[in-house]
Amino acid sequence: MTDPPRPSSVRRPRNSAWPSPGALILTALVVIGVFAFPWLNPGYRALSFAVTTGITAIVLYGMAIPFGQAGIMSLGYAGLMGFGAYTAAILSRDFGLNMWEAMPFSALIAALAAGLFGLPSLRISGHHFAITTYVMCELLRIALINGGKFTGAATGLDLPPIGTVFGVKLDKLSNTYMLVAAFMFISMLAAYCIANSRYGRTLRSIRENEQLARSIGVNANMHKVGAFMVSGLFAGVGGDLQAYNFRHISPDLYGGATSLYFALMVMLGGPRTLFGPLAGAIIVTFLPEVMRIDPVDSRIAYGLALIAVVMLLPGGVIAAAGRFYQWAARTLRGARAGASSTDPGASWT
Amino acid sequence: MATLEIRDLRKTFGGVVALAGVDVTIRSDEILGVIGPNGSGKTTLFNTVCGVYRPTAGTIHWNGVDIAGKPAYAIGRLGLGRTFQQAMSFPALTVRENVQIALEHGSRREDRAGPQWSSAEELLEFVGLEGFADEVTNVMPFGNLRRLGVAVALGGRPAQLLLDEPAAGLNEGESVQLTHLLRRAHELGVGICIIDHHVGLMAELCARLVVLHFGNKIADGPTEDVLNDPKVVEVYLGDVE
């Protein structure tokens, strides 16, 4: 048989699941930078927003699994975070569980809720599904407001301090920051491992062509709901950390508006890149507050940024930066030796 | 030998009767062709067998197991693979990943399944795409995309492959390559059932033909006999005089 024609198609430079040396160096720099941040004397305000940013990033790394890998956008993640936070608060109030003891329950309850939120994806998709999850999130907020003493109604619930672990007093803000940073990097690693696993490949097959995936034996329904449940684990852990960080939670923290911000962050940063969710959280949560941008101005900027990203940088700013890096590397190498080589940078897939 | 037995299969869409009680037996030791005019129910037959549609009535048994109404993924795992009328792939993924996904799912029951590929590379070599493993498929030439569709279907280790117009859009040379590929797959024990409008290809490839017309089977037998059947000539082939 004669050889098929050679295409002039896009070629993936590497097939290994392991990051390139460039990506490893970049990752190491980010890890060092994040953990070194408190030593730069950023001040209480900036450090406090950094903690919030880290917790948000944990949720976003979970969100990136169904959105980035399976291609299913949900607007219910604030609600899932709320399940985690309220589970932690109620277990603390009624059973005296501390943050660590409550964390598995927060993760589990949020995962089960995520499975419930994901069920409509078996019937509807795209914007219809996103709107459905937004409504579910709002329903949760209304239920929390009307939950009486059990949920603390509109006032919400109080929590005790995080306490001391191995002699380290975690209530001190810099120590809370370190704890959140550690969980954030664990979330990043977990999301990376999922994206580069057989499971991640299965989710991508559903995203790319669900009908074809089903024909070769992929149980798309199970994997869709499963992806939501996995992402719910992240949201539950984020909720637990947030509840103990704020020490007071109320329904308004977990409404549809917060979910929209989460969606904005993950789209801005890029759901299919290693640093995309973190970048999105920094751009939307951290920078406007630290730069003291007027809230109204920042919302206008978010809207414009989202339109710009959707139209010009559909993979998010990190993916765009990766493409720019590849282009620059190709140009430089081409200028030097006429060779063509690329580096995938920090891309997951 | 695996057997797909379709009895009195009916599929209606509202008032439209797509399949009006079709009886066909498909054996994995043969290459069977399904022909018929547009709208005769060929693709609906495949879609109903493969779980895309739930049959309105009738039975479908694959190796004695009733698969009528089972979900598509469950049928795929039982060793019944397929390709689609539109050339399909997982577009943003590489050729290797496309095949890898099929190898990781698909049939797991070795007693019923077809060839066991040890790696994506082995399968890509079989279909002649070994040099394209790292290519992203959304910009592949159409001929290679058709070939990849067969590779993905074979990756599921099917005992029986249902191919829906695999040669549509291919030039003469590519059609010949595809014919060779399907013959080699059949030699490995994969049953081939193929829908196509290319009568020359069907005549060369298939030992037996089934002809559908308005959801009814009007002919079923050796290729030469079917192609000379006056009824088939009238409704599908046309008078060459």
Image (spheres, rainbow, N blue to C red):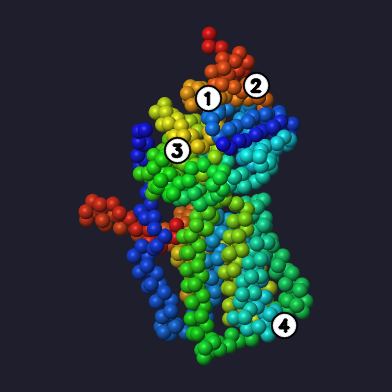
The answer to which of B51 and A121 lies nearer the viewer is: B51
Say which of marks 2 and 3 sits in front: 2
User: Which of the marked residues, 1 or 2, is nearer the chain's N terminus?
Assistant: 1
Q: Are marks 3 and 1 in contact (CB under 8 Å)?
A: no
Say which of marks 3 and 1 sits in front: 1
**The residue marked by circle 3 belongs to what chain?**
B
User: Is residue A186 left or right of A94 when viewed as pictured?
Assistant: left
Pointer 3 residue: B147
User: Which of the marked residues, 3 or 1, is nearer the chain's N terminus?
Assistant: 3
**The residue marked by circle 1 belongs to what chain?**
B
Pointer 4 residue: A94
- Cα–Cα gap, marks 4 and 2: 74 Å
User: Of the residues shown, which amino acid type is indicated by label 4?
Assistant: Asp
Dot 2: what SS? strand
Dot 3: what SS? helix
Specify few, some or many for label 3: CA neighbours under 10 Å numbering under 14, 14-19, or 20 or more. many
User: Of the residues shown, which amino acid type is indicated by label 2?
Assistant: Ile
> Outermost residue toward the left?
A337
Residue A253 visible at all = no
